[in-house]
Amino acid sequence: MPFENPFGYNTADPFSGTAHMNDAATQHDNPADNKADTPTLRAFALLEYLVAADAPVSLADMAHDIQMPKASLHRMLGSLEAGGLVIREPGQKNAYVIGPRLAQLSLGVMMQAGARRMRHAILGRLVADLGETCNLTMLHETEVLYLDRMEAPWPLRLDLKPGSHVPAHSSASGKLLLAMMPREQRGALLRAMKLQRFTPNTLTDPELLESELDRIAHKGIAVDNEEFVLGIACVAAPVLKEDGTCIAAVAVHAPVSRTSLSKAMEFVPRLQEAAKELAGTF
């Protein structure tokens, strides 16, 4: 199905700064249409398309979906590739994915001040209700990225500031985010992961981890039973978009000496409530 182009692509050279005018009179009457059809916005729309694809896309498929000539598209991709915004998928000729610069930009946007203030307030209320440390995370490659974290007023704590990363396979949030992915995408990611052991409870066997992820996907809740740090248990709930896609995870963790895993499971309804609030900040 052709890509629905929000900026009205045409057959012009994407970096020429000009547009092919099929109806000059109409465009003259609607100057806003001309402003929306610029090389910069066409390049931005192409990046949006690659992000939405969530998989390598060939030059031929792109040309078909967005209805742009291959030569023009190739020049646009060349400039974006030079800037680190897209890269060619290793082992696939003329297949592209988002690049490291764009990925870093997206993380910066996710952690920008306005949204972070709202999320921090939601986490603050959650910590006040549960009496334990809570966090909001997303999956970044094979690791969990902390978008925000609110400490409970206890002397024993982990030093995991916003921007910190932890391995996905050994954390409740990471396992949840992996479990909620499409199976094929999840499998590819697991094959790229190094399943390092951190405690005797860390799942390092790929088959056992897959089985655990299947159970998590069914239940919609994940736990960390002292799998990353001995003496620390965690429970995580998904932050879902309206279409059911998991975009983040909200979690509570505590020393088992104070809050057992079974006790932490009692926090699930409140976690799910906070997850619905947090979904509105994305």
Image (cartoon, helix red, strand yellow):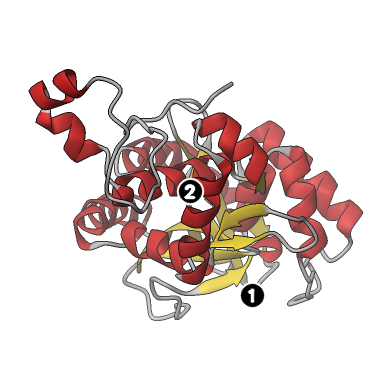
Residue at image point 30% right, 52% down: 40
180 displayed left or right of 281:
right
Which residue position holds label 1?
229
Which of the pair 136/6 is nearer the observer? 6
175 displayed left or right of 159:
right
Residue at image point 52% right, 40% down: 52
Residue at image point 47% right, 61% down: 80
Which of the pair 243/62 is nearer the observer? 62
Q: Earlier in the sequence, mark 2 or mark 1?
A: 1
Instruction: Give coordinates of residue 104: x percent, y percent.
Output: 44, 67
**Residue 133 in view in this figure:** no
Q: Quadrant of the N terminus?
A: top right
- The secondary structure type at the circle numbered 2 is strand
Q: Amino acid at mark 1?
A: Val
Which residue position holds label 2?
248
User: 101 above or below 32?
Assistant: below
Instruction: Give coordinates of residue 180: x percent, y percent.
Output: 64, 40
How many numbered marks, from 0 up?
2
Instruction: Give coordinates of residue 245: x percent, y percent.
Output: 53, 34
Distance from label 2 to label 1 (Cα)? 22 Å
Frontmost of labels 2 and 1 is: 2
Residue at image point 50% right, 28% down: 3
Q: Quadrant of the C terminus?
A: top left
**Residue 218 in view in this figure:** yes
Q: Amino acid at mark 2?
A: Ala
Q: Quadrant of residue 184?
A: top right
Do labels 2 and 1 touch, CB within 8 Å? no
User: 230 above or below 27?
Assistant: below
Q: Badge 1: few (under 14), some or many (20 or more) residues near its Cα, within 10 Å?
A: some
- The secondary structure type at the circle numbered 1 is loop
Instruction: Give coordinates of residue 118: x percent, y percent.
Output: 22, 51
Per the rendering, the mark at residue 141 is none
